[in-house]
Image (cartoon, grey):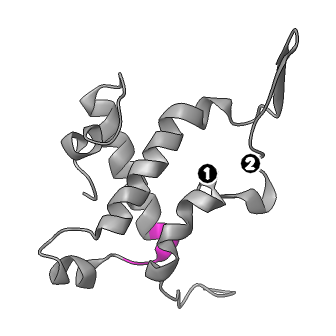
Amino acid sequence: MILTVSELRQYIITDETDQVLEAKLQALEVSIRNHTNNNFKRILAENNGEYPMDIKMGVVNLMKWELDNREKVGIASESISRHSVTYFDMTGDNSTMGYPVALVGFLKPYKRAQFGRGIGV
């Protein structure tokens, strides 16, 4: 696993249970591996079974966004009396893996070419 729940709790404060956080962390790891087409075997072997800190902190940022903003996806703006809030647009080129593109940029150096999934395969 990229991060344990106890490691994640060092960086964020949340009321979510450990089971929910662990499930989200596992799902995020699968998404990262699929998105990058990288199983990270070489990187893990070079780092004594640990993911590099840039990946760990990227996951922390994704989890912060997940916990704070996921429920707001799809709401473009909100107004109450004289108070108005506009949210980030999650359409088209603004999102990847269900997260804002700016948050998944840390994965770019880890992307691997994908072969054998062309037309007719």
Q: Residue at x 52, y 89 (%)?
A: 113
Inter-mark Cα distance, 1 to 2: 8 Å
Main secondary structure of the magenta stretch: helix
Element class at badge 1? loop
The residue tagged 1 is: 98
Q: Quadrant of residue 87?
A: top right
- Asked whether 119 or 19 is in front, the reply is 19
Instruction: List the single residue furthest toward the front.
Output: 82
**Mark identifier at residue 90:** 2
Q: Residue at x 53, y 32 (%)?
A: 68
Is residue 121 magenta-colored?
no
- Asked whether 53 or 108 is in front, the reply is 53
**Residues at badges 1 and 2 in contact (C-beta under 8 Å)?**
yes
Residue 53 position in % (x across, y down): 30, 66
Instruction: List the single residue furthest toward the left.
Output: 48
Callout 2 amino acid: Met
Q: Residue at x 47, y 68 (%)?
A: 34
Q: Is residue 92 above or below residue 109?
A: above
The stretch of residues the image draws in magenta is 34-38
Quadrant that contains the C terminus: bottom right
